[in-house]
Amino acid sequence: MFLSSVAQSRNVRQGKSHICIVTCDFWGLPAAGGTATAYHLLAASLADAGPRVWPVTFLGATHQTSLCQDIQQNFSSASINFECLKPEHFLPEVVNNFPYEALGVAVVRWLQGAGQKCDIIHTHEWGGGMQQLAALVSMRRKPGLRLIVEPHGGHYWSSQGTRQRPTDLFTLRIDDHERLTMHLADDVKSPSAYMLAHLRQRGWRLPSAASVIPNIVPQAATSADNRQLKPVWQLAFFGRLEERKGLKLFCDAMEMLDISTLPRLEIIFIGGEAQVDMIPSAKYLNTRTAGWPMPVTIYGGLPRAAALAILRAEGVMVAFTSLVENLPFALAEACIEEIPFVTFNVGGVAELFDADVHADVIVETVSALALFDRLETILHQGTLQTSVLHPAIKNSADLWHLFHVNQDLSERHRQPKRVAIARAPPVEVVRLAADYSSKTLKQDVCGHLADDSVLLLLPPEYSMPPASDMGIIEYVASQLPRLSKTRMLGALVFGAMLPNNLVSYPTSPTWMIYHGSEPLCVESSPLLILTKLFCTNFLAEAGDFNVFQTWVLIHHLRMAGLVTTSFPEPLFTLNGFSRADTGCLADRIPAFRKLEGDFASNQMGVSEQVLISQHLAPVPHPAASFRSNFDKFQGQHGWQYIAVDEHGAEKGLTWQAGDTPVTEDGKWACNDSSQAFISQTTLHPCSLPDHDCCQANTAAVGVRHVSNLWDEAALVEITFEVWPTCGDGLSLQFVLTQNNLSSVLFSKVFPALDVSPPHRETFEKVLSIFPGDSLLFLVYPGANHDCDGVYVHDIKLWQSKATQMFNSTHELISGQ
């Protein structure tokens, strides 16, 4: 295995590097996007670079191994080695603390086997799953192996424009692992200068050599050098039919146009199907455009060639209204195909062409009114010039070839024929007792152990690895001095094999080992750190955390500018979980972690960071929140918990306390032994014979909020996960009742699916709401219902002032 034997010096291969492209987005997947296009074109260009051809392996990283194998069989390029992950790469199973974690571990296992041929690895940052890969490569177990990361747009970047900044634990984990992926990489090559600036402004740490190389665009090198004047009388929306691409904003602008003043106008929509307001986008567009006075044509799911053929027709102009972009491939295609267009000036759009020469196609303000003003002017004049690509875009393939030539040359000169292995510092194992005092630990270590030694802090819940694996720990210890200087690495934490034969890794920002399905966890994990760094940065004397926990040490390291990452192999064994609490669920804040005593203290660092967070991205409180107000009293804060039988009769649920006084341990249920209940904001309906569902054969369960708010533009928001994994599925309804008249905000049916992770959706709608109005979210069982349920992340009602605040701010500006 790649990291399973004691390090040995070895020969370094000289010559052309074997290039591996590892991506979770690739052609053939149903939702393949811009990352897939960028990597397929890069692979094709490197594998067919004239006299300089590199061997290329393309790894399609997905849980859908059978689908990937089908794509592999139909892969058309003989010069590219297309590979897929195999089922064995996902074993032993990994506890998924965020969506891409298990997938990232599977990639590491691939690299330890078939991937050992790689000399240069290209991958993306988004999803955070490649952090384990970055940690592995940084260990330099294979001399000369280099990781190049291309930022195609991370989780927070893609959430710009949403009404509320996401701050849930999954989002925070994804963001931090995306940051670590970039930080641990050997180099970063961004498609745009915009993206580099965006990341640096938010405190992302990038390699010193980070620079811009645009994505490869086919036929760019031979595209036109001069702009052409073309007639315009058809407006086309081209892109995925979703709000992030500006679909609603485009429609708003179309409805401002006065067709009676225009000589001719037709509207075209071309794009992949999505959802808008919880309904299919085609249905949304058919309803919204039904009364428009101009002809409207909607094309959904067209092949790209067919879409371009429509856009190349005489008179067509594209309006690119995307709210968030990096370096959009569709815009570059429009330049090559000489299709006239206008575009919002977002992201790296202006880097595609000379912005000074193309001022007539750039709409500076992202708004329907600004778009309307520009479109009205163009339609009245009846013409618009095409756009010409910037020279850097035209030459992007040459730039990528030159980069890889230089990588080959620099590696050849940098590495000797024999690689010297760093001297391993002594590893001092410190077995921690339960409730080990922080001050005692520091006194026992500092001044008694050599500064150049390495500490292995082992909590009592873990067993040491077998002697055969100690060589790995010694090798990793030998890399810590280098990584502390080159990567500002403060510590390494280790995952473990669990008693249930799963593997769990500690992940930021909680750094706990989770059970995965039960509310069980361990707060600390094995940690490797240079003794000097421990004694300098562990601030036990502050007295805020009297009992040692690894997450406290990691917090202190972060305050000193040092990062922590997990090691991508589970060397240790967990003997048992030490804490049972709802905070041991991966999506719950561990509320049991408190400062000593009742003292308030700012642990966030510099005051400027706190202030910037508050005034650039404030987090107002909703007028009502199901999760925050979840209580054991009916009607508290306007929330009611109900069941509805097959005849429509409504029954109030009663609170049944759990084993502890904590609210999350109890549930809302009927007085009988019914399986209809609400527990930990999970709604579990019931379908059983013999009237075992609240004295009925079936019982839907729901939560109702009775408003005390008067607001003509309130925002209602609901985020939920559906688990239709047994029985025959379930259905949902969200109903608004005003003046005894009810209207369905959305209604959906979910058949039984044997899938993981669950289906997750968010619904938002602005509406008028007044005191006494009610919102009811109901979950209905199928006829053979067993264990399906709907986990409600939250149902929130925001006052209009809060929604205005969301629309005017995008994202937290903060350092790591």
Image (tube, rainbow, N blue to C red):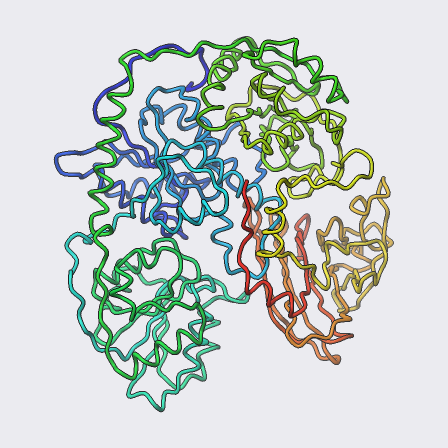
Q: Nearer the viewer, residue 147 or 269?
A: 147
Residue 69 vertical placement versus 116 (above, below):
below
Q: How many marks?
A: 0
Within the image, what quadrant is residue 695 found in?
bottom right
Counting from the top left corner in percent of width and height, residue 291 is at 45, 84
Give me the residue at 63% from left, 45% from top: 607
Residue 686 visible in this rendered orientation of the protein: yes
> Toward which corner of the image does residue 17 lie, by quadrant?
top left
Residue under the image location 45 percent in, 35 percent down: 183
**Quadrant where the N terminus is found in the figure:** top left
Viewer can see residue 310: no
- Quarter holding the C terminus is top right
The image shows residue 730, relative to residue 473, as above or below, that is below
Could you tell me which residue is drawn at 74 percent across and 48 percent down? 680
Which of 313/539 is in front?
539
Q: Is residue 198 left or right of residue 618?
A: left
In this rendering, would 142 be left or right of 437?
A: left
Write the residue at 31% across / 82% down: 265
Query: Percent x, y for residue 193?
Result: 35, 49
Q: Nearer the viewer, residue 28 or 589?
A: 589
Q: Residue furthest bottom?
A: 260
> Residue 168, percent across and down?
62, 48
Residue 267: horizontal and vertical position, in percent?
Answer: 35, 77
Residue 225 appears left or right of 392? left
